[in-house]
Structure formats: structure tokens, C-alpha cells
Image: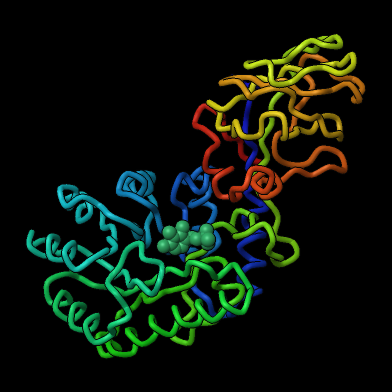
Amino acid sequence: MYNRSWVEVDLTQIKQNLRIYKDSVAPNATIMAVVKADAYGHGDIEVVKLLQCEGVEHFAVANIAEAIRLREHGIAGQILILGYTPVEELDDLVAYKITQALISEEYAEALANTGKNVTCQFALDTGMNRIGIDADDPVKCEKIIRKFAERLKITGVFTHLCIADLNTEEATIFTREQIRKYEAVVERIKDLNLPYNHCLNSAGGLWHRASVNAFIRLGIVLYGLKPDYANQIPKGIEPALSWKSTVAMVKIVHVGETIGYGRSYRAEKEMKIGTVPTGYADGYNRLLSNIGYVLINGKRAPITGRICMDQMMVDVTEIDDVKMGTEVVLLGRSGEEILTADNMAQQIGTIGYEIVCDISKRVERRYI
Ligand SMILES: *Cc1c(COP(=O)(O)O)cnc(C)c1O
């Protein structure tokens, strides 16, 4: 496994990304680091421990297992679960001092009915239609929040921006409207003095301002990727994750022969083909079959044929000195060439988030 397929996470880069991000947003901004999905595939414990040293005290995760994992590794501070946790898991929420998002009035009722003193934050739906109580009616929101403030330990309200990464006029107007709806609710419950109200994600923090406070849920940019690959993010923020493998074997393929399952690639000339021991079970997206590329010795090696479960074949005809054991860069830098998760995402119509989150657990994470 050691030299088959592995990820290198540059923790110093994550630290730099945090510092540059903070410098580019409101100077007094408080950061809640979003470390769901194993810190977007980077390794939650290592990332959180680093961030704690940098003074970050608030963390957000997707589910209770992720939250408990942090606590069991000695992580203090606030841990907020951003989505649904079944009511049956309530005892763990309390025992581990985890903050739960209240995703609806019905859900709040179910939690309150248990009579347990759960710490919660109300999700407000300002236009995404995912979770939260409908902020189109701030009076009703106020009523609901006040009602449950007596039965649950409510420490804040939050909303999520769904198009803050797009800078068209229409998108900007929509985002401003989301922030306005959120602020209207916050204003109505001001006297409750809730300590943690927040509405900004990575993109929101960079390109929008909320007057209420500057508490930012920072995810993707912490890892050096862009909310959308068309975005310009502050200089010096770079991907912290590289993904590497090694050449397993090199062979000559003759004119007319085909490569891989389904015989989807046909050699038009004599070719030198390298087999790389990484495939879709490692999280390498199969849609990159015949269109993606890897980097070897500072050059691009196009993927030939379909990505297999555990292996892929690449064209190394034009690359010198390729043999068993030669390093293959799946994501990251090789010589002058750089291939980012955002580049890869663009090739197959997805986002960098999905590329890094999909790198599977059998790919070892190393920290540099
Ligand atoms: C994932 C998530 C974030 C982080 O978003 P980024 O675009 O990665 O900064 C923030 N808030 C909520 C509710 C999320 O689900």
C-alpha cells in the first residue's frame, strides 16, 4: 500500500490559506472551520489540531459520528452539526457537548419533547430550500425561535448562501436578499443575545458583507480550492493536497491494439503505455476515462481507455525515463506542470469539493 496511491497534505499550506483568508476578509472575523467529510478528504484530526494551534475554536461537521470523532481525539471548542441528527442520538449530542442545527420546527419540537437540554442553533432558510425555517416570514421565525428558546439551549441562528460564488448581477442580488432576510430575523431576536449568528461560507466571506457580524464558516478555501473554478481567490491561497501514485509497469502497444475495458481506446501508432495502480475504488473519477491526464516527470500523460477499479493506463510515449516505480502525480505539481482538483473538476463538469472528498479511505494520507 505504501507506494501504491497516497495523498500528501501540506499542513503549512492550510495554515497559510487560513491566514491569507483572514487578512482578506473582515479583520475581526471569527472563523468556524468546516471540517465535514474528513476535512474535505484532508484528514479531520490533523487539520483540526493544526487549526486549534492557529486559534480556531469553532468547527462544523456533517453528522454526529464526525462530531464524536473530534471529541474523542480531545478537540475542545464548539462543534456544530450542520444537518439532521436522528432524535435517537440525542444522548450523544448532550454527552459530547455538541451543537445541533435545528432544521425545522417539527425537528425542534421532537428534540424539545425529550426534555433534554440540547445546545442548538436554528437554521434559517433564506432561499436555498434545503434546511431551516422559512425566513420569508421573519415574524413567524421570531415566534418559533422564542418558543424554543425556553425549551432548548439556543446559541444562535444561521443560514447558508447558495450562489455567493457567482458574481453576475442576478446572483449578487439574490445573495444580498438572502443576507437581508437573515439579518431581519437576527434583528428581531436581538434581545436574546445569542452569541453565534452566522451566514457566510468561504465565498460569502470573500465577496459579501453581512452587517450583523463577521462569523464565517470557512470550508473550501481553507483547503486552497475555489468555490467555483471560475473564481479568483486571494493570491497565496493554494491547494494543500497532492495525490500521488507510482508507475507499476510500462509496455509497448502496437498500432490497432486496444486498451482497457470495452476497448474504448485504439492505438493509432506504436505507443508506450504506463499502468498506474490507482482507480475508481481509490476515488479517481471514472468519468476521466480517455479525457483526463496525470503528470509524470513534469509532463502530461493522457489517460488511455477506461479507468479500472484499481488501475488505469496512461500514454507515456513522449515522456522519458518512465519505469516501474516512477512517481505519478494525480493531483499537484510535477516540474512546471500543476494539476489541481479544480482543473480536474472542470474536465468532468463537477466541483473541486467532490474531487477531494471522493479520494477514498484506502488512499493513505501523509502529512508534510
Ligand atoms: C459545507 C458548508 C459550508 C462550507 O462551505 P464552503 O463553500 O466550503 O466554504 C458552510 N456552511 C454550510 C451550512 C455548509 O453545509
- Give the camera-side residue of 345 and 51: 345
Quadrant position of residue 134: bottom left
Q: How many marks?
A: 0
On-image quarter of the C terminus = top right
Decide if residue 36 is on the left or right side of residue 226: left
Q: Residue at x 60, y 53 (%)?
A: 223
**67 vs 226: above or below:** above
- Give the camera-side residue of 305 and 179: 305
Q: Residue at x 27, y 60 (%)?
A: 100
Give the x, y percent position of residue 349: 62, 47
Colouring method of the image: rainbow
Decide if residue 48 is on the left or right side of residue 304: left
Q: Residue at x 67, y 53 (%)?
A: 13
Give the x, y percent position of residue 50: 54, 53
Give the x, y percent position of residue 44: 47, 46
Q: Residue at x 25, y 66 (%)?
A: 120
**23 vs 99: above or below:** below
Quadrant position of residue 122: bottom left
